[in-house]
Amino acid sequence: MNQRNTPLTRASWRSQRANHKRRYITGFDGLRTLAVLGVIIYHLVPSSLQGGYLGVPIFFLISGYLVTYLLIQEFETHDRINIKSFYERRVKRLYPALVTMLLGTTAYITLFQRSLLVNIRGTVTTNLLYVYNWFEINHGQSYFDRFNGESPFTHLWTLSIEGQFYLVWPLVVLALLLLVRNKFRSMLILLALAVVSAVAMALLFDPNNLNRVYYGTDTRMFAILIGAGMAFIWPAYKLRDDISSAHRMLLDAAGLISLVAVVYMFFTMNGQAPSTYRGGMFWFTVLSAVLVGTVAHPGSDMNRILSNPLFDYVGKRSYGIYLYQFPVMIFYEARVKNIGNHPLINSIIEVILIMLVTEASYRWIENPLRRYQYRNTFRDLKRILSNPGSHRIASTISVLSALCLVLTMTGFVQQPAAPKQTALQKTITKRQSEAQKKNAAAAKKQRELAAAESKEKHDKAVAYAKLSKADKATAKYYFLNADELNTSKNTPLTAIGDSVLLDDSGDLQKVFPGAVVDGQVGRQASAMPGVISSLSQRGQLAKNVLVNIGTNGTITQDNADQIIHGLGPDRQIFWVTAHVPTREWQGQVNAMIHKTAKKYKNVHVIDWYTTAKGQSSWFVNDDVHPNNTGNRHFTSLIAKTITKQLNAENGKK
């Protein structure tokens, strides 16, 4: 490695051939296992591993490193790179499982989950062409939106980036070897491009549109480029295992520290935090590169540490595990409605199903077709058709493949022209529009109530008999007494939340005429600081704030602190617990809400989860959004809790 700055002529390449012996790096299977476990756990229980999505940069790093150093090794050995052979190997490795997943998933959707047929032609076609990540930027939902009609194809964006990399990379490596002819300089060029990619991620980051930086090839290439740059100066086949004890200790220390740091960031790096895209993911990748480098070095013990039969098994199947995970999870969770009540049991079942599907694919599709000579296809099909009994596995796979292909074509034909709104979506859209129309009047009412409160104290002991006929009907409908209704009518309120709040907005503004409602379908806790700031600038942030967030994803301590600090200590904050039994994060969200209420004296819990638990008749089919009956109880609980707290506060005064 001490000659890395010396220009490399073809003669110097050839003189080193004797030492070019390929070494299978078993520890890379351990790294793949670490990466795929991070992704799987994140998708199953995001509240337990909020940075599990970072497994993807590790996959990118390994791909960049291995592909580049194998191409360099081929050039050193043969004075050329067989680009045609490279493409054939990639196609045989990647396409069989990908095509199987696409056909099988689309066939299932066509039969059982037709609402997911939206954009199915574009989804399948762009995946086959490896440009799906760009399609997702404009057509897909956020990677972090785990509630609203999640697609079983979302995760395939990574394969498209790798496919684009494989397409151009033999040419790039060949150009560097022939034109630059200096390993260290080639590495610097690739690292400079990696920095440009990371800067592009930081500059293009938009919290309201994460898709652009999360799915974009240009903003995610830095991981592949860092791995590729390493291959020029740190190729495993040239590294010596007979190093000094001091060097071995240094490598081991670097490897262990980077491994601990990577695992720590798996637990702590929020995928929606601005810091993640403004350098956080880049530095995670740099740390991962240190880990990859120490595992690749034969003189380090890291390869041995990450090599064992379990890691070997999972690592070799990591591609299939990654492919099949989302379809299995989404189809399973669409059928099982109590995920949030039994997250561990359901996660174990889902993992078992993923591994069974992956193993079947690995044994009967991926491995056989990787070695298959496709020029014999017609001959072998003729042999199977003439005597199917002698080729049972091949016959079964052929029949299933034909059936899936027919169903996929049927799904293509039946793809809806545009997403069809469900009855719930229509209701929420209508109520969102109505709430926005009422917000101006509600803001005016807030100012009137604030002015009236500064002049005189409202008498809350109004007898039920003195209520107007309309107020009596309202109080009866929402199970309220005179004090609760009058307090609600005279309480300025700003309500911020997601689709559950929008669904209830009509009822809420009937009981709280001074309520400004700001709801958004799919809204998550990370979006709240921006919403709070906007409401404050418009003068629509009342001294009492209702927060209904947690339906669509986890809430971290940082999220909660930012929300409370954004609202300030002088406001009374009423946070509604989440009733979302179909998602595992229900327990984590509610625990965080209760924890936040204990931490801040101006935060009060409205425990909708406990009130609604077991009341299936209060909800529409998703068991999350209340129906008309549920909205009555939801509004009633809010009014009663706010009245009780405000009375207590006034009593203190």
Image (spheres, helix red, strand yellow):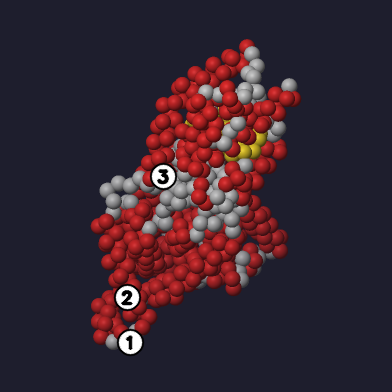
Q: Earlier in the sequence, mark 3 or mark 2?
A: 2
Residue type highlighted by circle 1:
Gly
Q: Nearer the viewer, mark 3 or mark 1?
A: 3
Image quadrant occupied by the C terminus: top right
Per the rendering, the mark at residue 402 is none
Asked whether the residues under the numbered discs 3 and 2 touch, taking CB atoms below 8 Å apart as contact, a structural biologist would say no
- Label 2 Cα neighbours within 10 Å, binned few <14 / some 14-19 / many ≥20: some
Tag 2, which secondary structure? helix
Q: Outermost residue, front direction?
A: 465
Q: Earlier in the sequence, mark 3 or mark 1?
A: 1
248 to the left or right of 32: right
Residue holding disc 1? 389
Q: Nearer the viewer, residue 82 or 20?
A: 82
Q: Earlier in the sequence, mark 2 or mark 1?
A: 1
- Label 1 Cα neighbours within 10 Å, binned few <14 / some 14-19 / many ≥20: few
Residue holding disc 2? 398
Residue holding disc 3? 424
Residue type highlighted by circle 3:
Leu
3D distance between C-alphas at marks 2 and 1:
13 Å
- The part of the image, by quadrant, that contains residue 565 is top right
Asked whether the residues under the numbered discs 3 and 1 touch, taking CB atoms below 8 Å apart as contact, a structural biologist would say no
Residue located 71% across and 63% down the image = 245
